[in-house]
Image: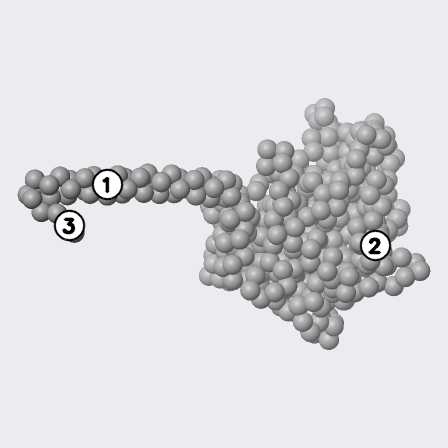
Amino acid sequence: LKIESLYQNEEELNYVVIVFQNPESKEFLGEQLVLDSMKYKNILVRLATPQHQYAKQKQLNVPTLAIFKRKEYQSIYESPKPLNLNMMREIVRRNEDTKKDKSRVNNDNFVTPKEQLHLSDLKSALSYMLEHEIPMRKAITGEKLTALKNFLSTTAKYLPLEMKTVSKVLNQIVHWLSDQEQVLSKDFSHQLQMVKEENFPSAVNWVTCKGSSSQYRGYPCGLWMLFHTVTNNFDPKIVLKHIAGYVREFFGCEECARNFGKGAAKIDQDVENAEDVVLWLWRSHNRANYFLKGKPSEDPTHPKQQFPPNSLCPKCGGSDEQAWNNGEVLKFLIKFYSELKMNSNDKELKEIHPKFQQFWKDNVAFEYKQDKNNSWLDWNQVSLCLIVWIICSSIAVLLYFMIRLLRSKFSSKSGYYKK
């Protein structure tokens, strides 16, 4: 394995990552890692088969990887077991700049973000999904295509009203997908660029989902936020099934998708109404947090815990001594994922989204939100109308007295008078 030859004429290259995988593998983990690593100038990813001399010598399981540092002939890391895509990404990012990452993780000045639903996290999750995760599939057809259309259509339907532009773009993509039997990665990306509007989210900017370092939190956190948001506007079962379809066919973490799918297989027997939809997804998220606690992907400044903690919902229970109070949890989740925070001139604005009453799905909710968003405009309109009314009333009164005066003068000249 002539690793040193890869460094030739590459002054900025510090790390080489060799991904060992079966050529017939349909997971494309190595290929996806190659795409992900292109944004790093000091890292290079290459693919190799299990028959490679190094893999045989080390008896490596596949898919797996080995990381080599410049001027070092031995690998600085070899994965002890087969890895999923997210784990591969984390290892690569950690080794991209070890000192830099350590200084970030140990940075005492990093403040853990406040737990809240933030517009920027939802936009960032959708941006990463559309720009990176979906195009990682070279060809989308059959069940994958159906799952994609269903998920994007459902997401467009139940996004917050503040994301109308994104909903419009998603609907346009769904309309385009409906006419396709097979979608290539490059065609999807091209179509996205065609329908994107000026204020469509493109840059990723995590707020609540911001980690202490780049390999922590981010997209998985934002994706969960997105799932909770669309289920909070409820349509029994079908929303969960569309989410499960997307996770199964597109989510980069194969192990995560497999675990999610095991629970999703019981949706029909576990979910009967809108409340069940919200609680089912909440339990699934807490199970994921339980299994990921203490794993390398865990942010040391934001340890995995069961949600909501007592600090956010004292009545919800969930401690070692107390079981969850599902009624209180449901009320908390509805409120939490209905209150959207967004930045506007460094000012935090609250938006109340459709609750668990059917009338919120009508125009009343929309008019109510518009009134709140445009309250300054409404007051200006009221003031303007009041001024116009006063002027018109004054003119009417003035005309009335002028007519009375003219009539009295006419009556005196003609000799007529009223008894």
Judge from the rendering whether residue 61 lies leftward or rightward of residue 174; answer left or right: right
Q: Which residue is mark 1?
A: 401
Q: Tell me whether the residue at label 1 lies in contact with that at label 3, contact meaning CB atoms closer than 8 angstroms.
A: no
Q: Name the residue: 83% across, 52% down.
A: 309
Query: Can you give x and y, in whole percent of width and height, for residue 23 in the image?
Result: 71, 53
Element type where label 3 sits in the image? loop
Q: CA distance from mark 1 to mark 2?
A: 70 Å
Q: Three-letter amino acid code at disc 2? A: Pro
Q: Nearer the viewer, mark 1 or mark 2?
A: 1
Judge from the rendering whether residue 61 lies leftward or rightward of residue 145; answer left or right: right
Q: Name the residue: 69% across, 55% down.
A: 335
Question: Height in image: 204 above or below 146?
Answer: above
N-terminal label among 2 and 3: 2
Q: Tell me whether the residue at label 1 lies in contact with that at label 2, contact meaning CB atoms closer than 8 angstroms.
A: no
User: Which colouring convention does the figure follow?
Assistant: one colour
Q: Is residue 316 visible in the rendered structure shown here? A: yes
| Towards the viewer: 237 or 257 | 237
Q: Three-letter amino acid code at disc 3? A: Lys
Q: CA distance from mark 1 to mark 3?
A: 18 Å
Query: Can you give x and y, in whole percent of width and height, for residue 276 in the image?
Result: 71, 68
Judge from the rendering whether residue 148 lies leftward or rightward of residue 271; answer left or right: left
Q: CA distance from mark 2 to mark 3?
A: 82 Å
N-terminal label among 1 and 2: 2
Query: Can you give x and y, in whole percent of width and height, for residue 218 in the image?
Result: 72, 44
Residue 314, numbered label: 2
Dot 3 surroundings within 10 Å: few (below 14), some, or many (20 or more)?
few
N-terminal label among 1 and 3: 1
Q: Which residue is mark 3?
A: 418
Q: Three-letter amino acid code at disc 1? A: Phe
Query: Can you give x and y, in whole percent of width and height, for residue 169 in the image?
Result: 50, 50
